[in-house]
Image: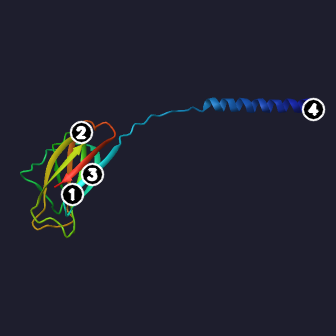
């Protein structure tokens, strides 16, 4: 009987060892490579009385005709959009410019040029204008088509509203 007990113990140890070996080989190790774009820094320079909000980069889904500086986009009750000519599938940078309740809000009819410098390339300007009379809390999205690819990472950019 003792011999049967030691055989049973040996059989359990062998089965456990085989189970652990099979389990170790059955679990796979997968390695996935992911690439990320990074921006090293951004600067937004805004004239008194306006606020600029960085809305980032995205791919344009549909093309859009550019706005003309001979007819600046005026702040209004509905959000406006001033943009360079946009091609579908290109990268587009978006900055939202908003009028504020600041005491230093620009006078009615003040015109501004909004430009983007990405790496060392300048885009724009797109032109915006305060309404008659000046009203706070209104927005204009300023969009810049920057082409099929972004510059090699890391890159920096600067937005100027003046």
Task: Calculate the distance from the C-alpha at mark 2 to the C-alpha at mark 4.
Answer: 80 Å
| Eye-nearest disc, 2 or 4 | 2
Mark 4 in CB contact with mark 3 (< 8 angstroms): no
- Observer-side mark, 2 or 1, equals 1
Q: How is the image coloured?
A: rainbow
Mark 1, residues whose alpha carbon is within 10 Å: few (<14), some, or many (≥20)?
Answer: some
Q: Earlier in the sequence, mark 2 or mark 1?
A: 1
Mark 3 highlights which residue?
43
Reading the image, the residue beneath label 4 is 2
Q: Quadrant of the N terminus?
A: top right
Q: CA distance from mark 2 to mark 1?
A: 26 Å
Q: Earlier in the sequence, mark 4 or mark 3?
A: 4
Q: Which residue is mark 2?
A: 90
Q: Quadrant of residue 10?
A: top right
**Alpha-carbon distance for marks 4 and 3?**
83 Å
Q: Residues within 10 Å of mark 3 (few under 14, many from 20)?
A: few
Question: Where does residue 123 sit, x and y in percent of width and height?
Answer: 18, 44
> Front-most of 37 and 159?
159
């Amino acid at each position: 009987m003792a011999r049967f007990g030691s055989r049973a113990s040996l059989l359990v140890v062998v089965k456990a060892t085989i189970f652990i070996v099979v389990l170790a080989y059955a679990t796979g190790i997968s390695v996935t490579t992911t690439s990320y774009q990074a921006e090293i820094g951004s600067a937004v320079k805004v004239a008194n009385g306006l606020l600029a909000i960085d809305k980032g980069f995205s791919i344009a889904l549909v093309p859009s005709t550019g706005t003309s500086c001979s007819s600046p986009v005026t702040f209004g009750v509905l959000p406006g959009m001033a943009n360079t000519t946009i091609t579908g599938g290109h990268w587009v940078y978006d900055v939202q410019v908003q009028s504020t309740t600041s005491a230093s809000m620009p006078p009615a009819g003040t015109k501004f040029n909004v430009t983007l410098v990405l790496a060392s390339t300048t885009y724009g300007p797109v032109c915006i204008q305060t309404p008659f009379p000046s009203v706070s809390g209104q927005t204009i999205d300023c969009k810049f088509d920057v082409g099929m690819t972004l510059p090699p990472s890391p890159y920096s950019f600067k937005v100027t509203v003046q």
